[in-house]
Image (tube, coloured by chain):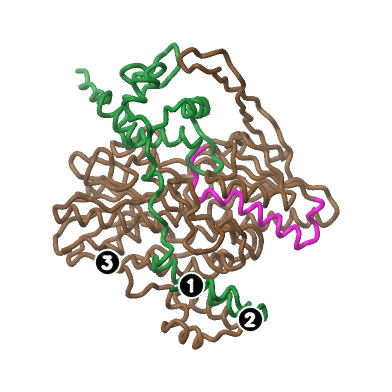
Chain colours: A brown, B green
Amino acid sequence: MLKEGMDLIDAHFKNEGVSRRDAMKMFGAGGAAMLMGSGVATEATAGSSAVKAKILIIGGGLAGMSTAALFTNSLDNPDITVLEPGSSATSYQPGQTLVGAGIWDADAVEYKTDDFVPSGVTLIKEKAVEFDPENNTVKTSGGKTLKYDYMVIAAGLKLDYARIQGLGIEGTITSRGDDSAVRKVIGKNGITSIYFGNGATDTWTEMQKFIADAKSGKKVKGIFTHPNTPIKCGGAPKKIMYLTDARLREAGARDNAELTFYPNGSKMFGVKEYHDAIVNQFEARDMKWNYRHNLIGVDPVKKVATFNRHWKEKGPWDADLEEYSIVMKAETVEKEFDFLHITPPMKAAEEIANSPVGSAKGWVPVKKETLQHVKYPNVYALGDIAAVPMGKTGGSARKQYKVVAENIISMMNGKEPTAQYGGYTVCPLITSIGTVMLAEFDWSKKPTPSFPLDPTQERWIWWLLKVYALKPMTQYGMLSGRA
Amino acid sequence: MVCSLVEHKRREDKGERMKKTSIVLLSAVALFALNGCGDAPKSSSEAKTYAKTAGEVYTQSCYKCHGDKAQGLTEKKTPPMNDRQAGELELDLYDVKNEGLTMSSGTEHDKMAHNMKKLLEKGYDYDPKAMAVYIEKNFYKMPPKEAPAAH
């Protein structure tokens, strides 16, 4: 599998007349093997690591498995158990956008959990169903009671399509695993969603029909939604729209399609510089948008999407505030579509949300810098389930897993957990086939570019980074605890 | 080092552009992977200073609508803030001050986000973390333990 990543990169260089040998000469390293970051940051840097402790990791996706790998690299006597029921939890989710637009095949993002279990780590293919953090125990779906010294919660999140009425969906699904409850209706009749594996595959099938209709001369409408909950990869709802636009242009059929983005919120991006850049990109492509619309229902037969449209109006004078108050208004609006891309509401798994380690909103409440639980000092959380602003991306997890491992190793050595996550996250925003805006930012809400290039520009090299480099970096660098 | 290479390569002639892009890409990847010279800077919010302490802001402004114990006032339709610990509360305050936590999801505090803007203009700015800690320290009430089962 490593070879596959290397071949991709090498093929790319070959196209451009650079041999791997030249690349090796230039960098004194072996071509794409640089991506492995070999010899760099292979250990957490928290002093002596000979102390023994039982570490339980809930969830073996990108966040959980990378943490397990880093512990394995850093500890002399690792005692690590990962609870993960999914057989392809380590799949490369950021690639689902590319699958949805027919740029990658589905098997390019499918990775088996078993292939990424670090040596020496015990994988139990069950899920955690009961948490007793007072007694440091967790009960599993198979009836086991597991005791831990430290627990890391990296359980990801649930896709809550059931909240959208009219689809006949009950219960939640995850991005991988059994999706039958959702796939019976999403992925058909122009209704799509790239947020689960098969959904991405079906999106491309439906998108091709949409484009064929436009090409045949029919006037068609595409609708792209963004819900009122925190979501993983906040850029994906827009990326799939940009790619639909690109595919329509490629087919010479763009003029026959109207594309509209309906987000619940009232901006394109939390960082002003990126917001402005996106607005310009939308305008340049004649992509429309309509803020403050939350998708609440879909009629799959009539092909009508129902939104809760909400807005603010001036209310009575508030003497305490010394301002006019505002009142919220809302109405239900219906929009016809030929192609609908749904970004579903998302939430934490009930068994975690409702447990002592959960919170009213479900996400596991942690101190956002150290990622330590607000109530239980030997419990940490990272990835999609952690209650930190913004960061439900692989890019955030890439910074977070090192913080978690380092802090737990510090505590094992009787020290304070001092490693801090600064809120960094990254969104390689695909703006067409061949361009990406690499939006990096943190809690300061300012662009934090890693490269000396204007971060608000769409660039071909970031497309190459997204399409060729980030996957091997993630699958072989991060999941082995190295990058 | 790698950063300067990127700059240098940009100045090369266009005929070599494809080749150079590869080099830039490799440099970029190396930087990304190795957390090199351009690593994300520390959050600049740390450097921000505030005219008033969290306590001053609370006792001069917030209490009017949220109550002197952060208990929430029915007549103002304000929610309690004394039922959560700082780590949890901070997320809500962050949401209020930034009108949302993720890109285009919007905020669940539309009204307060609007009011907050007005209050910021009046000088009641605060660090969400400091405010969350202040509220927890002074007002936090542990949720009642579950009542013992009736016989």
Q: Amino acid at mark 1?
A: Ser
* Residue receiving disc 2: B16
| Occupied quadrant, residue B30 | bottom left
Both labels 1 and 2 in a single chain: yes
Crowd class of label 2 (few under 14; some 14 to 19; many from 20; radius 10 Å): few
Q: Amino acid at mark 3?
A: Glu
Relative to B56, A273 lies left or right: right
User: Which type of secondary structure does the marked residue at label 2 adopt?
Assistant: helix
The residue most toward the front is: B51
Q: Residue at x 16, y 52 (%)?
A: A415
Are the residues tagged 1 and 2 within 8 Å (C-beta)? Answer: no
Crowd class of label 1 (few under 14; some 14 to 19; many from 20; radius 10 Å): few
User: Which type of secondary structure does the marked residue at label 1 adopt?
Assistant: helix
User: Which type of secondary structure does the marked residue at label 3 adopt?
Assistant: loop
* Residue receiving disc 3: A43
Quick check: can you spot residue A176?
A: no
| Residue A317: image location, x then y, percent | 55, 13
Q: Residue at x 82, y 48 (%)?
A: A219
Start and end of the magenta stretch?
A229-256
Chain of the residue on which disc 1 is drawn: B
Q: Residue at x 35, y 50 (%)?
A: A382
